[in-house]
Structures are given as C-alpha cells and as structure tokens.
C-alpha cells in the first residue's frame, strides 16, 4: 500500500490546490472581509505577542492593539480623507489650465527650441474641450459608483455589512490566532512537518519584510513628498506626493512619476525656475531620507519581495479572483518565492544536477585525499 500512496500523493496535492482555487473563485465576495481581517490579525500578532510577554493576558493585549488600530483608522479618515477629497476636487478643475499651458506655453517653446511647426496641428479650443471632457468623466466615476450603490439597496447593505464585519472578525482572529495556527499545524502530515514549518517561517519573514517594512516606507515617503510639495505652493502637491510615495515599491517608478507630474504642475501654476528647483529639492530630499533613514530603520536587512514579483502577483490575482485575489496576491507571492528557492535548493542537491558526483558530493574518480606519494611527512629534512 505504500507505493500506490506515494504515487498518488502529488496528484492529491494538485487536486487540493485546484479545489481551493475553485472555492476562492466562487466565494470571492463572501471571503473578502475574512481575508482583510486575517491580514490585519497577522500584521498585529507580533505586537500582541510583545505586549503579552510583558505580563499582560492575551485578551488584554488583543484589546489594547485593537483599540490602537481603530484609533489609527479614525485618524486617517478624519485627517487624510478630507485632504485628499479636496485635492481630487481641485484636480477636476485643473484640466482646462493644463490645456491653456500646453497651447500657450509648451507648444511655442517647442517650436522655438527645435524649429518645428506643430501649432497648425493643434486646435487650442478642441484640446481644451477634450481635456475638460475627460477630467469631468474621470471625476464622475466616483459619483456614478456611489449613485449606483444608493440605488441598489442590497449592494449598499452588503457593503455596509462587510465594513462592519471586518473589525469584528479581526478581533476574533487576533484573539484566537495561536489556536488557529496550532490547529493547522496539527493537520500537517508528520513526515512533512519539519519542512512545512521551515517554509512557513521563511514565508512569514518574506511577507513581513515587505508589509511591515516596505509599506511603512511607502506611506512615510508619500507624506514627505505630499507635505513638501504643498509647502512650496503646489495646489495638487499632496495628491501628487501620496501617489509618488505609494508607487515607490517599484524602485524609481514612484519618484519618476511624481517628479514629472510635479514639474508639469509647477510649470502650469508658477512657470518659474525657482519653484522647479524647489520641486527637485523635495524629491532629492525624499530620496536621501529614504536611503539613509527610512529603509535602514523600517526595513533593515529583512527579506522582501522583488518589485516585479509584487506587480505580477497583484495583476494576476486581480485577473483570476478579483478584489480577493488582490488581497491574497502578496501572501501567495511570498509563499511562491520561498517554494521556488526551496525547489532550487533541492534541485542543486539532486542527482539530476550532480549526476557526475557520487553520494558524498565528490566527482567520480576524484580522490578524497592527497595522493599516497604526497601524503607522507611534510616536515623539512
């Protein structure tokens, strides 16, 4: 019976993964609040354990951390959301200004600089109307979504129920996190238990290094850019800065996009060299703070996910499983990267890779020690 079971084991694992993927695809909307709550509980568990080690009970530690998380969410909603709302409303009025700047400043400068004639191919009125129409269309997306939710009572109730369910489930997950981990641990087949536990710890380090480190850097960098650009007088400075910071998980992408957007906004609003220098100073200062302060302090030498892996995981998860797939993309990517390294390790130790070596890792025909005629007394005569 042992040989058939060994032969069936890979197919049983494959069938289990297929069934799991099918369930995620079918139950995505229902599982979304539970996935959010599980991620929040996982992020908060180290802090709960630290408070518990100082003599507090598990219930007290969970309550303190839960109150801290709730207060943080309330502060974000009260402080950042109104500010971003104002910035988005200002962006809706910024389209016509951009059209005037393109036709009145940018095109004449290009023609004078490169001795080309492009003004004949650009209709200022048509360009302004086009930008205005697209800006209004983009600004109306949120209104259409909110209007659709208000008209559909069931959809609105489902949204409210999910939002109320997340903190409740998060609290229970935080309280019973160790018990759930122990229950999963008991289900692992005993021959695979050491390997699975090691890979699970490595996955936790990879995902933790990204979420607890890189996300903190992204938010801090967004605040630095946003506050800096606002202080130098850009109307859309905070919005541009936050976008640049949140895109900084891809090296140089957030900085490049934010710098280009800030330069264009500066040329439209001010049009002088002084403000351009200030914009460059804000982004240069942000890069210095990130490289010498934020990354060493918040990330350190912890293992993170490669930016390409993060982008692909998020896009693939959203395409396959919708919003639930986006939430589970980073944990899945962390596990996949750890499994890939483990597979590489096993491959380099296998006979397929080392077919010219014996079981002790020595080349066939290679002596394990010095030749007999060279193994004698090496002391000087």
Image (spheres, rainbow, N blue to C red):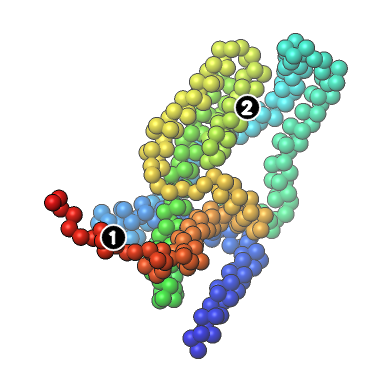
Q: Position of residue 50 (x, y in %)?
A: 31, 53
Q: Which residue is mark 1?
A: 370
Q: Secondary structure at mark 1?
A: loop
Which of the 4 quarters of the picture holds residue 203? bottom left
Going by the image, does 216 lie left or right of 31?
left
Q: Position of residue 152 (x, y in %)?
A: 72, 54
Q: Is residue 220 above or below residue 25?
A: above
Q: Is residue 364 above or below residue 240?
A: below
> Which residue is more in the foreground, 247 or 13?
13
Q: Which mark is residue 261?
A: 2
Callout in the foreground (1, 2): 1
Q: Secondary structure at mark 2?
A: helix
Counting other residues with Cα less than 10 Å from the Cα at mark 2, is it few (<14), some (14-19), or many (20 or more)?
some
Which of the 4 quarters of the picture holds residue 358? bottom left
Q: Is residue 70 above or below residue 372?
A: above
Residue at x-position 82% and y-position 15%: 117
């Amino acid at each position: 019976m042992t040989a058939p079971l060994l032969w069936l084991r890979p197919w049983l694992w494959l069938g289990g993964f297929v069934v799991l993927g099918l369930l995620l695809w079918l139950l995505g909307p229902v599982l979304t609040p539970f996935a959010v709550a599980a991620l929040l509980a996982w992020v908060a568990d180290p802090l709960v354990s630290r408070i518990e080690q100082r003599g507090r009970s598990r219930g007290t530690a969970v309550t303190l951390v839960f109150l801290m998380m709730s207060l943080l969410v309330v502060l974000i909603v009260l402080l950042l959301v109104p500010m971003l709302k104002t910035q988005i409303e200002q962006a809706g009025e910024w389209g016509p200004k951009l059209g005037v700047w393109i036709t009145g400043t940018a095109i004449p400068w290009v023609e004078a600089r490169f001795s080309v004639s492009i003004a004949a191919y650009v209709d200022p009125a048509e360009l302004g109307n086009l930008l205005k129409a697209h800006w209004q269309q983009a600004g109306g997306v949120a209104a259409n979504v909110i209007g659709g939710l208000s008209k559909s009572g069931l959809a609105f109730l489902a949204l409210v129920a999910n939002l109320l369910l997340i903190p409740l489930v998060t609290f229970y997950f935080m309280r019973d996190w160790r018990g759930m981990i122990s229950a999963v641990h008991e289900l692992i087949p005993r021959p695979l238990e050491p390997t699975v536990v090691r890979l699970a710890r490595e996955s936790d380090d990879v995902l933790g290094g990204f979420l607890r480190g890189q996300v903190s850097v992204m938010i801090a960098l967004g605040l630095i850019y946003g506050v800096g650009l606002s202080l130098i007088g850009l109307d859309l400075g905070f919005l541009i800065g936050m976008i640049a910071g949140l895109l900084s998980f891809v090296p140089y992408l957030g900085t490049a996009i934010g710098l280009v957007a800030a330069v264009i906004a500066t040329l439209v609003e001010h049009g002088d060299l002084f403000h351009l220098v200030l914009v460059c100073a804000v982004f240069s200062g942000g890069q210095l703070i990130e490289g010498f302060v934020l990354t060493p302090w918040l990330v350190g030498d912890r293992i993170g996910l490669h930016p390409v892996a993060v982008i692909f995981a998020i896009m693939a998860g959203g395409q396959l499983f919708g919003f639930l797939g986006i939430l589970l993309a980073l944990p899945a990517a962390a596990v996949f990267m750890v499994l890939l390294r483990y597979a590489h390790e096993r491959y380099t130790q296998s006979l397929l890779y080392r077919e010219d070596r014996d079981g002790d890792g020595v080349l066939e025909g290679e002596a394990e020690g010095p030749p007999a005629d060279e193994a004698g007394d090496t002391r000087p005569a």
